[in-house]
Amino acid sequence: MAQLQMSGTGYVVTWIALLALTTLSFGVSYGHLGVTADMAISLGIAVVKTLLVLFLFMHLIEQRASSQLVVLTCFLLLSILVTLTAADVATRHTFPPRPEPLPTESP
Amino acid sequence: MPVFQLPEQFSTIEKREHALEFGMWAFLGSEALLFAGLFALYAAYRTMYPYDFAAAAQHNKILIGTANTYVLITSSLTVALAVHAARHGYFRRLTAFLALTLGFGFVFLILKAIEYVEHFEEGIYPGRFYRFAELPSYGAKLFYTLYYIITGLHAAHVIAGMTIIAWMCFRSWRRAYTPDNHVYLEMGALYWHLVDVMWIFIWPLLYLVR
């Protein structure tokens, strides 16, 4: 039994909010604000939409904290994985090969 | 309608529901981490080929992608309303909403198929079969290979979700879900919502950031 229960109207209001956020995301993408800003804004809006779906459509708001902890852990793990992978690639520095020794040099 | 018998390992109905829901969330977490690997690949290759990825994303069909986003969000609404109907014992409404969700799933797959066919006509194939003359760079080929893997795996999840919804639709027609015992319906709905959440992240990465 849940103490907090979503109502039928609540679902429709959440749906309208999700449609509005989608339209906003779509519109902002035409602004071409540069790669970092574009990525940050669109992923930020995606996170807000996901939270709405998670808590309201998937009833996470009604459930026990242990279920909510599973979701939080997934988010954390996912963000660490993606951030560190991108950081690995972005900070790579390759070195040119060692020049061949001259013939007169002894090993 | 038989009276629901609580299995003896659970002391209350709420504990049984919590145990089932917790297990379902753990499973959804594992599915999300499956896609996390692909998102990590995307992040790495995007860092290596930023301009190629932006150009390739520019070429993607944003109208079909955005339409698919609206379709999946609406299907999430209908499956949530189905669960709501089950909670209050509206059996015919429950079956109708599940059937509607299934319909939206079909619309999503049809739009995806149209998109794939248009890509094939232009010569955009995954991996070494790629022969799109307008964007011949290695980065663009990588983007589209990732695109096919990510959307292909997501479409497989959509089909799996639709199978679950179809089964639940049939079971609901047989009055298997009552206000007292419909936790299996809630869990099946959770899988469909996860499919929607995945697309909510896939859509900006593949269509919007250009």
Image (spheres, coloured by chain):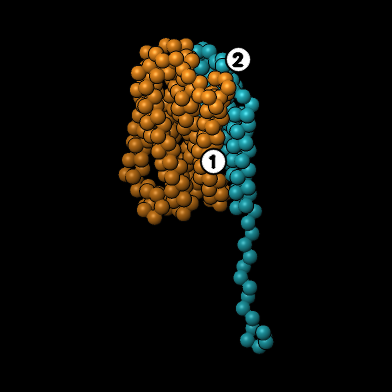
Chain colours: A cyan, B orange
Report the residue marked by disc 1.
B33
Quadrant in the picture for residue A17: top right
The x and y percentages for residue A46 are 55, 31
Callout 1: SS: helix
| Front label number (1 vs 2) | 2
Give left or right: position of A18 versus B101: right
Residue at the (59%, 32%) spot, across then down? A71
Q: Which residue is found at the position 45% from the left and 27% from the top? A: B188
Q: Is residue A82 left or right of residue B130?
A: right
Quadrant location of the N terminus of chain B in the rendered image: top left
Q: Please, which chain is the residue tagged with disc 1 on?
A: B
Mark drawn on residue B183: none
**Residue A13: image location, x then y, percent:** 53, 16
* Residue ID at (45%, 53%): B137
Along the line of sight, the residue nearer the viewer: B115 or A12: A12
Please name the residue that numbered disc 2 is placed on. Answer: A3
Around disc 2, counting alpha carbons within 10 Å, would you say few (fewer than 14), some (14 to 19), or many (20 or more)? few
Q: Which amino acid does label 2 sit on?
A: Gln
Q: Is residue B92 above or below residue B117?
A: above
| Residue A17 visible, this orientation | no
Q: In this view, does B39 lie above or below B95?
A: below
Q: Position of residue B40 (x, y in %)?
A: 55, 46
